[in-house]
Image (tube, rainbow, N blue to C red):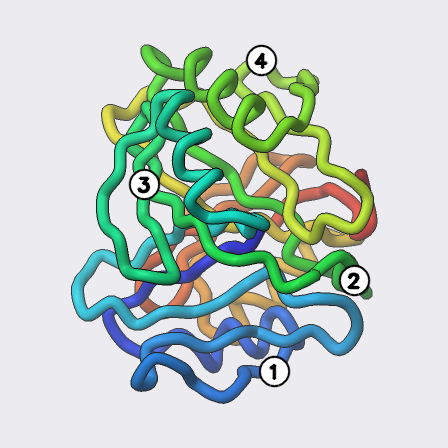
Amino acid sequence: MTGFLDSPSRVAEPFWEAVTGWSLSARRAGGAFATLVPVEGDACLRVQVVGDGPARAHLDLHVDDIAEAAGWVTGLGADAVADLGDVLVFRSPAGIVFCLVSWQGERVRPVGGASVVDQLCLDVPAGVYEREVGFWSAVTGWPVGLSDLPEFSFLVRPAGMGIRLLLQRTGGVRAGVHVDFACVDVDAEVARHVGLGARVVRRVAGDWTTLRDPVGREYCVTGRLPGSA
């Protein structure tokens, strides 16, 4: 599984290089795509220039057989959006965009120091939340774990998987995706991000802080420790 940062321009890419400590690869597809490459482990976060706003995020599922996986996810309730040849685009029952791409053998989780990109949080309206949790558990084959907070569930990721999936029940009407960092000290990590150009949106004492990157995309710094299951 890979997280994708979709942006109308490259403006925020130096910020994401700095906060992750990962380097940007050579660009692909005419300059639209690049990968944030960790010092150790396999990549799990990429950037894409989409040409329109707002800045947002989506996820890619890396599979052995794209056609077979397409039949699987549509059978579970996904809607096909686009066939880009080597990439198939879908929407989940709640409207979350995701892609099916070929797996290239990634199996080593990036090594985190004081912080690391740790999970993708799927923000799901309350009315479709239970169905969405079931959908993603069925698609991935990962069991559902219950959080200490009733508005959250997570999927138990296999060993070596760089990104965990967290699902949040929201009061909104549209579903979305955002990136979460794990870190050893939330306050220090937030201060570091702000120093690099982020803006604080809200703080939840002891748990997480929501920020915006330089193009306005929300993400969180959480109290989960790097390397947590």
Q: Which amino acid type is marked by label 3?
A: Phe
Rounded to the nearest angstrom, the CA distance separating label 3 from label 4 is: 28 Å
Q: Are marks 3 and 4 in contact (CB under 8 Å)?
A: no
Nearer-N-terminus badge (2/1)? 1
| Residue at the outermost bottom position | 26
Rounded to the nearest angstrom, the CA distance separating label 3 from label 2 is: 31 Å
- Location of mark 4 (residue): 150
Q: Which amino acid type is marked by label 1?
A: Ser
Nearer-N-terminus badge (1/3)? 1
Q: Are marks 2 and 4 in contact (CB under 8 Å)?
A: no
Q: Position of residue 111 (x, y in %)?
A: 80, 64
- Of the numbered discs in the image, which one, if any, rests on residue 112? 2
From the viewer's side, name the closer residue of 182 and 22.
22
Which picture quadrant has residue 217?
bottom left
Q: Secondary structure at mark 4?
A: loop
- Location of mark 1 (residue): 23
